Amino acid sequence: MFYNCLSIRLVATTYSIMKIANIIFYYFILGNSIIGYIIIAFVALIMFIHRSVIEKNKINFLLVANNFIGMFVVYPIFIDTAITSIYGLYHPEVSFDGWLCKFKFYCLYSIGFIYHASFSLQAMHRLCRIVYPARAYLQSFRLYLCLSISLWFLGPGLLSASYLSGGLEYLPDDYHCQFAPTNLGSSLIGLSLLFVLPFICTMSCYFYSMYHVRTRTIALTNINQGKNIRRDMIVFTRLVILLTCLMAVAFPHVMIPIVYAITGYLPSWAASFEWALTVTSINCGFIIQMIIFPHLRKICFHKRNIRPETQLNGTVFVRTTQNT
């Protein structure tokens, strides 16, 4: 009798700890989503103020805009999910199951693909600048505008099969829908489209560009072209490092279903932990992009230096320069 009471109390304590962990993670998601939305609004305002700078570098800003526009849709979904999950954890009798729940996460996953695929478009743009600098049509704004628009159809199209086949499931203990960690097949298929496919495309562009730079006679190119190639490769390397870090943070989305398939055990805080990492990586990704990409750094950290240039008859002429 004593051991039965002890085991019941232990189970109750474990459940309470799991529930508290879940609540903490969802509050963390809520706070980070609000912070992310503020970051997006700040960058959008800065881009509006510096419209003249954007006109001179339209392609790079267009490719970054895919990320920012998508997050304007995704962050409200994260905020709504966190609020409903917190409410459900305090009121276990409620349910938010239905077509709207599944459709919201279908939109979230679709934009997740667009977010990662936009890095592939940036990689393709850098590859064309490095490998085919003389082919103007491969560096035209119209081409990348068409490719960007096509992403917004490709993402929902690729994930429509998983959505229509019931791959998105309602998690009664988390009060939202997603690719269920307990469903290994749908999780791996959906997440492969979401993460792996864009990552492979980006890395292929990067390694081919590296191969071109190392095997071709770069010394025969003119000085300006050589500087452009070096600058593009630096930005390209930063892009690949950033995407690799984002993939590493998203790794639990893939590993948790595999661990469940092997062990048959899944902690109740697994889903909230996945999304907490996801929101954190997105926020960090935006901040890092503002620092490492010259075109974003130019408008987000706008600074002018004034230094003496020449002196004539006691008058000092100054030149204003802008840090880029």
Image (cartoon, rainbow, N blue to C red):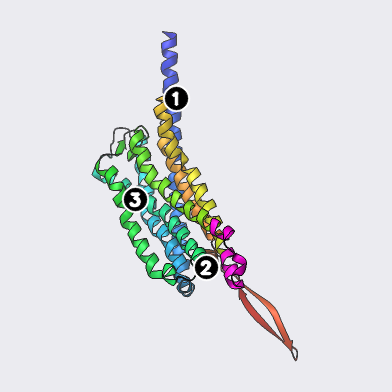
Q: CA distance from mark 1 to mark 2?
A: 50 Å
Q: Secondary structure at mark 1?
A: helix
Q: Where in the figure is residue 178, as x and y percent of width and height?
A: 34, 40
Per the rendering, the mark at residue 14 is 1
Question: Residue most toward the right?
Answer: 314
Q: CA distance from mark 2 to mark 3?
A: 29 Å
Residue type at mark 3 is Ser
Q: Reading the chain from its start, which is encountered first: label 1 or label 2? A: 1
Kindly identify the residue that appears in the image at 32 percent across and 46 percent down. 105
In contact (CB < 8 Å): disc 1 and disc 3: no
Q: Secondary structure at mark 3?
A: helix
Q: CA distance from mark 1 to mark 3?
A: 36 Å
Q: What residue is pinned by disc 3?
A: 110
Dot in front, 1 or 2: 2
Q: Which residues are magenta?
A: 211-230
Q: Secondary structure at mark 2?
A: helix
Question: Is 305 or 38 nearer to us in this picture?
Answer: 305
